Every structure is written in C-alpha cells, then in structure tokens.
Amino acid sequence: MPRVDADLKLDFKDVLLRPKRSSLKSRAEVDLERTFTFRNSKQTYSGIPIIVANMDTVGTFEMAVVMTQHSMFTAIHKHYSLDDWKLFAANHPECLQHVAVSSGSGENDLEKMSSILEAVPQAGNVVTGEMVEELILSGADIIKVGVGPGSVCTTRTKTGVGYPQLSAVIECADSAHGLKGHIISDGGCTCPGDVAKAFGAGADFVMLGGMFSGHTECAGDVIERNGQKLKLFYGMSSDTAMKKHAGGVAEYRASEGKTVEVPYKGGVENTILDILGGLRSTCTYVGAAKLKELSRRATFIRVTQQQSTMFC
C-alpha cells in the first residue's frame, strides 16, 4: 500500500552552516587532504576528496592532469578506448592514483574495464540508508549518493523519483559509517558553499559536474554565438549523449537529461582555487582545522533564503 513519509527532508538551499568558536588564525592552516582505508578492498587513498563527475564533457584526461596537480580526483568517463588509456598512463603516470575507471553494466563493458585495469594500475547511485548498507555488505567500498539533483538531470521531472540531497547525504553517511564504509555526494552543488555543506553533512567525497563545465579541459569545441563564447554540457542520459554513444534513445526508455550551453570559462585552475578557498573558509568559520573535522563541527540552520538578492 502506498505511504507518505512526512518527515522533513532538506536540500542544500534550505540550510546554512552556523559559525562557531574557532582558534584558527588563518585559512592557510586548514588541511583539506584526507586519507581513507576502504572497508572491503583494504586499499588506501590520500588526497583532497573532490571528484570531477564521469560525464564525457568534464570527466576527461585533460581535466585529470590539472586536478592531479591539486591532489584532487577525476572519474574518467567510460567512452575512452583501451588505447586512449594506455597512452594516458604512459604520458601521465602521476595521475593514475587520482583517477577512476568508469564502466557500464553490460558484459562488454566489464570486459573493457578489465582490460583497462590490467593495462594501468587500478585505482549506480542510491539515496537510502538501507541500500547503502546492502551494497557495502555486498562488497562495495564507496557508495554514490544522489538521484536527480544534478544540474542537467531531469530524472525527477521525468519519473517523479528523487530525494533532497542534504538529507540523503546525512542518512546515507550515517548508514555507511556504521559499517566503516564511505559515500560520495553526487549532484546538487551549485557553488563552493554547497560543497562545504555536503562535507558537513557527512560525505567522504563530493562529486561535481556542472561546476566543472565550460572549461578548456572539458571536451567539445568552443561555440561563438552573439559575441559570447560557450561550451556544451549535457547529462549522460540526455538525447545528446545517447545519440552520440548509442545511436539514439531506446524506445523502451525516456531521456533523463538535458543539454545546455554554458559560458566558456577558460582554464579550470581558477575554479579549483575558488572551491578550495571556499572550503578552507568554511572550516575556519566553524573551527575545523582539518576537513575530516568539518562534519563533527557542523550545525545546520534552516533558512528561507541564502543571500541578499538585491544585485543578483
């Protein structure tokens, strides 16, 4: 029988972090790097746990080269060939500890991924605690959390399915950490403050797509229209992506993504520094000397608006 969960669920836009007493004298004192040892594989990872999404416009080898310079992570999109991976591994061995190989769920996808992992060193989303526990107990180390919050995702309007991202992260992080697992908050961040809120809510990693779109390191040509420079950005379940990689949208499904033109922003370096600078400021405001401490220092307050709209 259908039921309604009437408990309040919140998104990033619904809250702010409350500042707290801090002994930090400078934002430069904040340590954003973390080291994780994963529950099932026993592998370890050290770096700043911000991930470029595995979308074919942003999850590129070019993006990975710049992200690695900041000890940040890139989930490489699944449409590169084995030869592409071999060339990348030969030219940029320093990047291999900061990239992930993406794969589809078909038999051919598994074979391709296995070939890539043999050639280079090895480095589904949910929104409920029950599924997080199920996946961790089945052998997963890190669970991606988020259904529908992405900037070019239309799942919520096409299917009516989703979950406010802040609440999803809080609930899923609680379930994962109880089993010594980890989660990635995937989607819903529109600014550095949202990234900080995701970490404050308990995310171990935060994955970003739209915030990294429109840069030189993104795939695709720069488009000039009415004197403005633009780049395409689209969801991986959009008409654009499925026509490009699968010949079109299969008749048994609907497109669950959109295609947008975003302003061309130049190199991604400034965006990276803006995100990391905002995150250090957050930690300073709440008294967290390390990123690891942010969730323990986080108190969220509900708000009706994020900022003054006078000059927006």
Image (tube, rainbow, N blue to C red):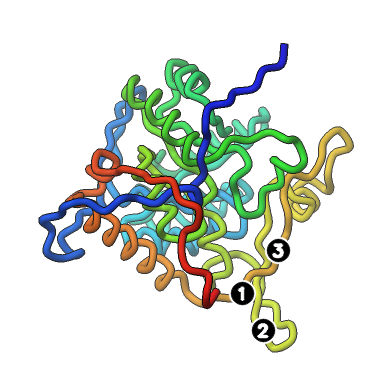
Q: Residue 237, can we see it?
A: yes
Circle 3 SS class:
strand
Location of residue 199 with respect to 137 vertically, above or below: below
The answer to whether marks 2 and 1 mark residues whose Cβ atoms lie closer than 8 Å is yes
The quarter of the picture where residue 270 lies is bottom left
Circle 2 SS class:
strand
- Name the one closer to the observer, 231 or 2: 2
The answer to whether marks 3 and 1 mark residues whose Cβ atoms lie closer than 8 Å is no
- Name the one closer to the observer, 127 or 232: 127
Residue 263 numbered tag: 1
At 51% from the left and 36% from the top, the residue drawn is: 145
Closer to the chain start, of discs 3 and 2, is: 2
- On the image, numbered disc 2 is attached to which residue? 228
Tag 1: amino acid: Pro
At 60% from the left and 32% from the top, the residue drawn is: 111
**Which quarter of the rendered picture does the C terminus lie within?**
bottom right
* Residue 63 percent across, percent down from the top left: 48, 62
At 77% from the left and 55% from the top, the residue drawn is: 240
Closer to the chain start, of discs 2 and 1, is: 2
Residue 260 numbered tag: 3
